[in-house]
């Protein structure tokens, strides 16, 4: 190992279009205590400098390693080519492992030989890559930055822009649509544009990443924007209906719980866009058998299907026992002729007895608008009615035309 002291343990060279993935890696490495050159951490330091000469010095002299995030975007950018050439000059001069290539796609980048060992997004997500970089640095006995006492005691960085405070409360420091976008990137790395997923087990695994806790935040900028003092960045929408997503649980390999709703997943479509407030997920659910398959259920289904395209059943669970909705509402049930008052709040559940579909996106999305409300109900009902998922392609074209009717929605956190 060289005894040379570097200003940075690792520099991150990437195209702006790939920022979301790189931001996640940078946050993970910073949280581990390493010194990272990542432009968002250097804005004040870069202010007023001649970036051409300064970045050349950074990539040529100031870092122990340089991780290059190779992609078609990377190949096309002038600045990334400048960074690459500076890094290659260093690697040629020192004749050591300096450039660590990471492939975001299969684009061949000039100067990066096919024989060079690389890692790929096909096998490494954000957390796995940051762990691999950490292992590389630790193998060279890189001394980690010591956290300040205040950092150890008060703040814990969970992911970029998301902090767990000493009080146990969670703070969000980024916009809601940026939070949704970085979660989307974690759950669906490598996706650009529109893509279908049809394996229910895979869908549940990916949703568990997208909707991992925390989903609600007590501390956030512009706190007056959120009723009740809680920020909930991710919502589901269906026409005029919409609700914040506060809790997600996996029930089985193919089934999950979204707050009180049981979701037996069938397929999912994800839409990734450089404009983060246009990104969304379309989720389609399978029909489930009712909890109690009696005449009341059949009557309820017929009634519901008389005025909408789907039917639900609500019920409750008390200490592992299924109870009727009426018992839940009355706060008691009858067992062996005895009236038993509930000592604790029963768990309320909704089950979909017919196929169902929703859109999941950021609350500050362009789709949280009156124009989108008018489209959602019509198209989502039409897909249920015809059973033809190709209808969604037409729906997607309509969504791309939506313009937000409230500038405040896009701007608030």
Image (spheres, rainbow, N blue to C red):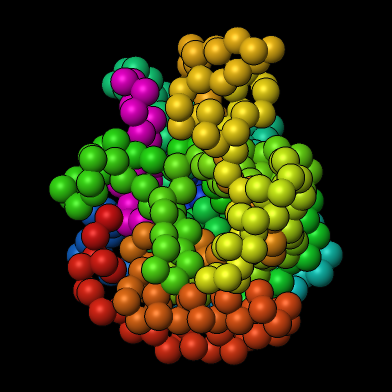
Residue that protrudes farthest toward the right in the picture: 115
Q: Quadrant of the C terminus?
A: bottom left
Which region of the structure is painted magenta? 161-176
Residue for point 48% across, 67% down: 238
Residue for point 66% across, 29% down: 322
Left or right, residue 362 beside residue 172: right
Left or right, residue 16 beside residue 316: left
Residue 145 appears in the rendering: no
Residue for point 46% across, 64% down: 237
Q: Residue 395's x, y, as percent?
A: 56, 84
Q: Residue 24's x, y, as percent?
A: 51, 50
Q: Is residue 235 magenta?
A: no
Left or right, residue 25 beside residue 140: left
When asked about the image quadrant of residue 358, the answer is bottom right
Viewer-closest of 271 and 393 = 393
Q: Is residue 174 magenta?
A: yes
Viewer-closest of 336 and 158 = 336
Residue for point 45% across, 81% down: 375
Residue 248 against residue 52 in the figure, above or below: above
Residue that protrudes farthest toward the left in the picture: 224
Q: Residue 372's x, y, as percent?
A: 40, 78
Residue 106 appears in the rendering: yes
Q: Quadrant of the N terminus?
A: top right
Q: Residue 325's x, y, as percent?
A: 55, 36
Viewer-closest of 235 and 161 = 235
Count of all numbered marks drawn on residues in the image: 0
Residue that protrudes farthest toward the front in the picture: 337
């Amino acid at each position: 190992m060289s005894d040379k002291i570097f200003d940075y343990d690792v520099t991150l060279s990437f195209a702006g279009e790939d920022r979301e993935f790189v931001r996640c890696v940078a946050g993970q490495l910073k949280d581990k205590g390493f010194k990272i050159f990542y432009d968002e951490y250097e804005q004040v330091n870069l202010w007023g400098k001649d970036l051409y000469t300064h970045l050349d010095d950074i990539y040529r002299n100031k870092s122990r390693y340089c991780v290059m995030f190779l992609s078609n975007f990377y190949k096309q950018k002038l600045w990334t080519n400048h960074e690459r050439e500076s890094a290659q000059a260093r690697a040629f001069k020192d004749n050591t492992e300096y450039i660590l290539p990471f492939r975001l796609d299969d684009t061949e980048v000039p100067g990066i030989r096919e024989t060079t060992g690389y890692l790929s997004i096909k096998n490494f997500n954000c957390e796995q890559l940051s762990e691999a970089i950490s292992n590389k640095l630790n193998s060279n006995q890189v001394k980690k930055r010591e956290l300040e006492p205040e950092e150890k005691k008060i703040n814990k960085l969970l992911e970029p822009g998301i902090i767990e405070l000493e009080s146990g409360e969670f703070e969000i420091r980024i916009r809601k649509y940026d939070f949704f976008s970085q979660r989307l990137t974690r759950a669906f790395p490598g996706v650009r544009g529109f893509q279908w997923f049809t394996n229910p087990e895979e869908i549940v695994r990916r949703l568990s990443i997208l909707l991992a806790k925390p989903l609600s935040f007590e501390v956030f900028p512009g706190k007056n924007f959120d009723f009740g003092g809680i920020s909930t960045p991710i919502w589901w929408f269906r026409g005029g209906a919409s609700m914040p997503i506060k809790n997600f649980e996996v029930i089985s390999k193919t089934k999950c719980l979204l707050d009180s709703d049981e979701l037996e997943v069938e397929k999912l479509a994800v839409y990734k866009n450089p404009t983060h407030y246009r990104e969304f997920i379309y989720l389609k659910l399978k029909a489930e058998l009712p909890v109690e398959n009696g005449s009341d259920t059949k009557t309820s289904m017929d009634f519901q299907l008389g005025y909408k395209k789907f039917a639900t059943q609500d019920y409750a669970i008390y200490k592992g026992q299924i109870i009727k909705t009426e018992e839940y509402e009355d706060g008691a049930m009858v067992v062996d002729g005895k009236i038993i008052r509930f000592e604790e709040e029963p768990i309320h559940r909704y089950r979909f007895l017919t196929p169902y579909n929703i859109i999941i996106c950021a609350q500050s999305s362009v789709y949280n608008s009156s124009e989108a409300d008018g489209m959602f109900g019509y198209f989502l009902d039409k897909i249920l009615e015809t059973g033809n998922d190709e209808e969604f392609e037409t729906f997607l074209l309509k969504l791309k035309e939506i313009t937000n009717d409230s500038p405040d929605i896009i701007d608030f956190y």
